[in-house]
Image: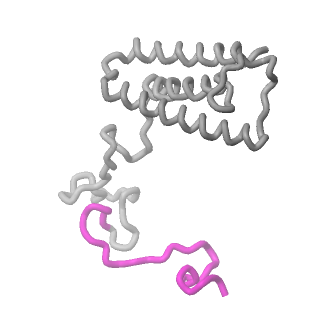
Amino acid sequence: MSYVLLDLMFLGCALLVTFAAVLLRRQQLSRQNVWAVAVALLCVLILTAVFDNVMIGVGLVAYDPGRITGFRVGLAPIEDFAYPIAVALLLPALWTLLPARRAPGWNPDGHPQHTGSASGVGSGENGSAENMDVDTGTSPGSGPNLNTTTTTSPGSHPRSATSGGNR
């Protein structure tokens, strides 16, 4: 199999996913997004040209002349540039198509959720222990906690975390 055939299969898959993302999420396509992809593509192509030429120049990589077209950028065969093109197209397309997932405790707008409130509503006064501070019996958002504790593992000395280890 020639490198061109392998490149065409890889680029074909990347282009299909990119077109699907453009068609399905057209409202998210903006000039700023297109420019971001173009700049990323340019950067990846430059990095590929530099590093491929270095690797080929020092003898880390060699290509079978019968499997490449012969067109080169410096020492690097043109076929090597299909992968960065595919990645620069595929990654934003997948990012657009896959559903957004947030870490627990974060709002969809990217800000952390607050579990308690200073007003007392939902701040653990109903006796639930899940949001209660063990030291003071208050919720995390209901005021300053002036008591400090050291969490230690069972069987260890409470000062071992600050005194340099178990004795």
Query: Does residue 89 sit above or below 161 in this rendering?
Result: above
- Give coordinates of residue 148: x percent, y percent: 39, 78
Query: Which residues are drawn in magenta?
Result: 138-167
Q: Please determine whether, in this image, residue 116 is positioned above or below residue 7.
A: below
Which residue extends farthest front?
A: 74
**Magenta highlight: main SS:** loop
Q: Is residue 32 above or below residue 68?
A: below
Q: Residue at x 52, y 24 (%)?
A: 90
At 24% from the left and 56% from the top, the residue drawn is 117
Q: Residue 58 location in percent, x, y?
A: 75, 44
Viewer-proximal residue, 86 or 119? 86
Rendered-image quadrant of the N terminus: top right
Residue at horizontal 71%, vertical 19%?
A: 70
Please indicate whether residue 70 sits to the left or right of residue 146 in the image.
Answer: right
Can you say which quadrant of the picture contains the C terminus? Answer: bottom right
Residue at (54% x, 32% y) in the render: 45
Does residue 13 appear left or right of residue 126 in this picture? right
Q: Is residue 2 above or below residue 131?
A: above
Image quadrant assignment for residue 39: top left
Q: Nearer the viewer, residue 111 or 47?
A: 47
Q: Is residue 148 magenta?
A: yes
Q: Is residue 146 magenta?
A: yes
